[in-house]
Image (spheres, grey):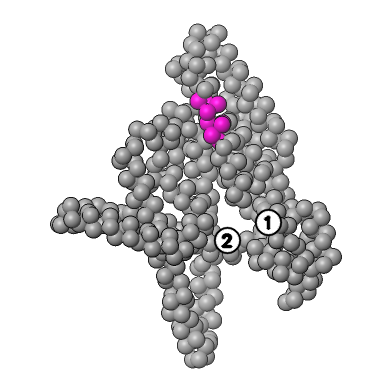
Amino acid sequence: MMRFGLIEYAVFIPVIYLGIVTSVEDIRFGKIYNRHIVTGLALGLIWYTLLALFYVFATGHIEFVTQGLPRVAGATLMALIISAGMWYFDVWSGADAKLYTVFAFLMPLSVYHSSDTPSAALTLLVNSYAAAFFWISADFLLRAARMAAARSAKFSTATAEERRADLRAIPLWLRASIFTWIKTFFGIVFILLLVRLLRGWLRDEIELMVHLNDTLLFLGLFLLFRPLHMLFQIRLVAAFILLALLGYFAWLYHSDPSGALLLEKADIGMYALGLIIFRQIYTFWSETVEVRRIPLTELRAKMIITEGLKRELVGREIFTAAEAKEINVEGLTDEFAVRLKEQYIDEKEPGTIEIENTIPFAPFIFAGMIISAIVGGVLVKLG
């Protein structure tokens, strides 16, 4: 295909403006307005039409029409499927899902020539979360350092009995949690082994659909971590996974008594451990920044209440179980906000209510697009 370098990046002038505006508004107001979504879609349609006309009439090349545009359409369709799934499973709000689809539609054409992924939609998804992971990790380190310093100062001034109580709490927490995390560890190892075996058996068939590299696999497991963690705690599931792993490892040892084949699988254990550790870092970070208490009079529609508060409201019959399920990442409806103001009384701090901070994701989607344009593919490559 004929390439004309910078001409394919001309659309970035209005795209950068769109990305800055949506990021600022998401940070300040927690909203991504539909007019920006419509503007992005219209911009993409006009841009690809002009680019196609340029290639056909100015250069005589039709490869962009026959090859480039179908790739763009395929990536946009994949982005629509991904964003719909993220919205359905309450990972993203509807606004985030629409913005992601728009930016996938406007991805730089250089991404389509990368060997990392066959789809700009997946490249944008990975790079958006890479940007989010870097920011979360940096913020976590700062918060953890401050909390460690505060805890150390408190421990140094505590009485001997208080220190013993703190130290006794550590093994108690380990005993209460260790088997839960062992089940999850073996469950993740089982999935990774299954994926590796499928890659070997059905490599060509899988590659026709998606280039399932380790980076994309890590992101998928991270996003699905909570339901998988709950699944692995079911005794029957845990027993099946343990028996399957023992049988597979016994077969490897039987095939090679030297243990070389077993050692080749050691990286899977490290991969699973790394995923669990990072997920715990994210959980700790989200618990420190996502929950805050506000005066009940300031409660508004679109605000998100915590899962614990939902259960409390159902127990106190302020909401039914069906109504509680309706409260997702889109937040409270006007009716629910009014009902809480009229009926809810916090027993610990009357006149206040606990809500979740909405973390603006528009800046990360925009950052993912910028990263994709600069790198021409995924930024972080695992494996």
Q: Residue visible at 57% across and 61% down? A: 286
Q: Residue visible at 41% across and 31% down? A: 208
Callout 2: few (<14), some (14-19), or many (20+) C-alpha neighbours within 10 Å?
some
Q: Amino acid at mark 1?
A: Lys
Magenta portion: prevailing SS class: helix
Give coordinates of residue 100: x percent, y percent. 60, 39
Quadrant in the rendering for residue 292 = bottom right
Give coordinates of residue 257: x percent, y percent. 15, 57
Residue 139 visible, this angle: yes
Tell whether position 339 is magenta: no
Residue at numbered disc 1: 325
Quadrant in the rendering for residue 311 = bottom right
Q: Amino acid at mark 2?
A: Ser
Residue range in magenta is 71-79
Tell whether position 75 is magenta: yes
CA gap, disc 1 to disc 2? 21 Å
Q: Residue visible at 50% across and 68% down? A: 145
Residue positioned most to the left: 258
Residue at numbered disc 2: 286
